[in-house]
């Protein structure tokens, strides 16, 4: 189990105990099992990632392959990447037989499993590892493997010791964007001080045992580094490449977290690519929209109509069989699929099998408009959210189903766009809604960041964020404060996902066009008489205006 999952389960167990549903002995046993796994010769710390940010690492020297393998199995079963240091070639050969997905680095003497890949994105901390000479490379490689296992963006600069100053100076530009630098050097240990004098980030010095007699097995390098005159240099033990990289990695990840806490302000509107002369409907995606129930067939119909008007190549509405005829009568251009329903005319859980083929062939999906509420629907929404890999918009009662199962929000099966109004947002977050504009922006961004979803927090100046970027919409008017306009937005965003836009871009453009259609409708009809279907009718003008020279964000003719 991953750290976030462990914390959620712990909270659930604690609440069950508080509510009297879980006896004290069972509560204690469950918490103990979550924190530690007894494999006989070792007690595996499964809570390390939650407390310290990264899982427990195995020191392989002196341990049998059997013990190391037992530890690895427990970690892999719980979703953790595994790392063992000081692994011999013989140990690695046996481990590779049990864990073919593992990677052995003979120079570093490390064995890692399911390590996160490196990334140059804002998500990853940036670490530069500097090796003074080629003889120091075994320690530098141990540091590099550790940083890779930590999921960091890693750069290795080798053979740039102080004896060749021109080589070092040529590499300084590659160090200056680092969040932390690990410098590995033997001999007199001068390199970390020189590097520290050229950069503004922490420098973690790793002395090595490389050198002649008076090197004293790395002691001379250690003492030289401890006496560094560069204020940003700190030191770890001799030949401790793992320790140096681990410390640097924690620093770098904290820096990356700080970057993510400051969203990128986006004010440039994404646009759809022009349609080629040879295009056909298959080029513009297949949208499947799931929802509707007896008495609420109009909601899903509005979503289907807006998806068509927003350019999806094919649109199919998956609705309860009891209201299929009503939904079909709204618009002949979309297709419908009648699903098994319960006695109240809502989609039944048994409809999941009927949906599978539609879900698998869709380019994008949406769920929620007119869906209704039931335990069956909670389970259906849980399956759609956590197991379907296709881009997916969740709105209305699908959001209410997620609010009752908040643990799902951190386990999306694929790209997700959530479109809550203020009440739904409060239920999703479990916190009182704050309508202050700055609080809206902050809360939208932080919720997107914590869930990994793109959040569309609807209302005056709708906020859109994916946890890295944020945009604030300036189109729309009070006439849109009427039932069904949110269902129209769901269809618009689903159609834009169908046509290949990334979730944030689809949501950003969708919200803008949706508001613009409302502005055109208000210009023609006035705000008082505006209804949701008027937005569908004015979507063509809204999209067309984006293709005109000089069209701008923020048009509001009302």
Image (cartoon, helix red, strand yellow):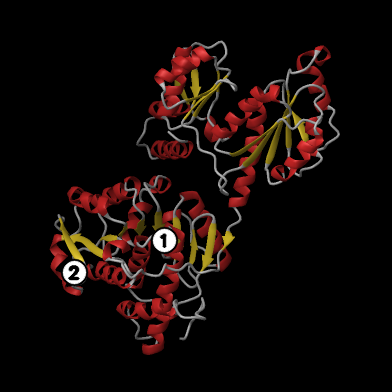
Residue lying at the far front in this picture: please name it.
278
x 49%, y 11%: residue = 64
* 364 over 408 or under it: above or below: below
Residue 295 pos. (x, y %):
20, 68
* 377 over 537 or under it: above or below: above
* 57 over 216 or under it: above or below: below
x 54%, y 37%: residue = 151
Q: Nearer the viewer, residue 263 or 110?
A: 110
- The reply to whether residue 438 is visible in this rendering is yes
| Left or right of residue 518: residue 464 | right
- On residue 501, which mark appears? 1
Disc 2 element: helix
| Left or right of residue 535: residue 190 | right
Disc 1 element: loop
Residue 550 pos. (x, y %):
52, 81
Residue 180 pos. (x, y %):
69, 39
- On residue 60, which mark appears? none
x 47%, y 38%: residue = 7
The residue indicated by pointer 2 is 327
State the separation of the CA atoms marked 1 and 2. 28 Å
Q: Nearer the viewer, mark 1 or mark 2?
A: 1
Residue 70 pos. (x, y %):
43, 18
Q: Looking at the image, tell me whether mark 1 or mark 2 is earlier in sequence order.
A: 2
x 40%, y 44%: residue = 411
Q: Quadrant of residue 320?
A: bottom left
- Graded by Cα atoms within 10 Å as few (under 14), some (14 to 19) or many (20 or more), the crowding at tag 2 reads many
């Amino acid at each position: 189990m991953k750290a976030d999952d462990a914390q959620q389960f712990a909270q659930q167990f604690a609440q069950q105990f508080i509510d009297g549903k879980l006896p004290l002995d069972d509560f204690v046993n469950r918490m103990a099992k979550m924190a530690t796994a007894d494999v006989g010769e070792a007690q595996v710390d499964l809570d390390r990632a939650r407390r310290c940010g990264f899982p427990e690492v195995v020191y392989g020297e002196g341990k049998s392959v059997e013990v190391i393998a037992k530890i690895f199995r427990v970690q892999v079963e719980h979703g953790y990447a595994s790392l063992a240091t000081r692994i011999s070639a013989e140990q690695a050969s046996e481990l590779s037989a049990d864990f073919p997905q593992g990677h052995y680095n003979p120079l570093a003497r490390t064995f890692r499993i399911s390590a996160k890949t490196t990334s140059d994105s804002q998500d990853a901390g940036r670490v530069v590892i500097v090796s003074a000479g080629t003889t120091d490379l075994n320690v530098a490689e141990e540091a590099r493997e550790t940083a890779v296992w930590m999921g960091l963006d890693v750069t290795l600069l080798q053979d740039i010791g102080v004896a060749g100053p021109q080589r070092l100076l040529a590499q300084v530009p590659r160090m200056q964007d680092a969040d932390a630098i690990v410098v590995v050097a033997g001999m007199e240990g001068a390199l970390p001080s020189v590097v520290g004098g050229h950069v503004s980030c922490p420098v973690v010095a790793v002395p090595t045992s490389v050198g002649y007699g008076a090197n004293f097995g790395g002691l001379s390098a250690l003492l030289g580094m401890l006496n560094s005159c560069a204020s940003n240099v700190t030191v770890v033990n001799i030949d401790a490449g793992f320790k140096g990289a681990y410390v640097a990695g924690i620093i770098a990840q904290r820096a990356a977290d700080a970057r993510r806490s400051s969203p990128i302000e986006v004010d440039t509107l994404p646009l759809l690519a022009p349609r080629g002369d040879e295009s056909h409907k298959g080029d513009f995606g297949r949208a499947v929209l799931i929802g509707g129930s007896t008495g609420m067939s109009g909601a899903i119909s509005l979503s289907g109509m807006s998806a068509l008007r927003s350019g999806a190549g094919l649109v199919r509405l998956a609705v309860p069989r009891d209201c299929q005829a009503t939904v079909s009568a709204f618009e002949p251009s979309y297709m419908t699929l009648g699903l098994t329903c319960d006695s109240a005319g809502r989609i039944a859980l048994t409809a999941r099998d009927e949906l599978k083929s539609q879900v698998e062939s869709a380019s994008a999906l949406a769920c929620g408009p007119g869906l209704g509420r039931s335990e069956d629907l909670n389970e259906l929404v849980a399956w759609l959210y956590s197991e379907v890999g296709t881009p997916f918009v969740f709105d209305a009662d699908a959001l209410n189903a997620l609010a009752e199962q908040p643990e799902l929000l951190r386990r999306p099966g694929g790209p997700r766009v959530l479109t809550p109004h203020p009440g739904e947002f409060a239920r999703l977050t479990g916190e009182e809604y704050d309508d202050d504009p700055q609080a809206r922006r902050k809360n939208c961004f932080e919720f997107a960041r914590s869930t990994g979803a793109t959040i569309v927090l609807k209302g005056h100046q709708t906020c859109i964020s994916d946890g890295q970027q944020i945009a604030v919409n300036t189109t729309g008017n009070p006439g849109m404060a009427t039932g069904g306009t949110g269902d129209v937005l769901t269809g618009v965003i689903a159609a834009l996902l169908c046509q290949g836009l990334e979730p944030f871009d689809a949501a950003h453009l969708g919200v803008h066009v949706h508001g613009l259609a409302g502005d055109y409708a208000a210009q023609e009809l006035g705000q008082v008489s505006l209804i949701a279907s008027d937005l569908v009718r004015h979507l063509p003008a809204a999209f067309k205006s984006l293709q005109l020279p000089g069209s701008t964000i923020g048009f509001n003719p009302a």
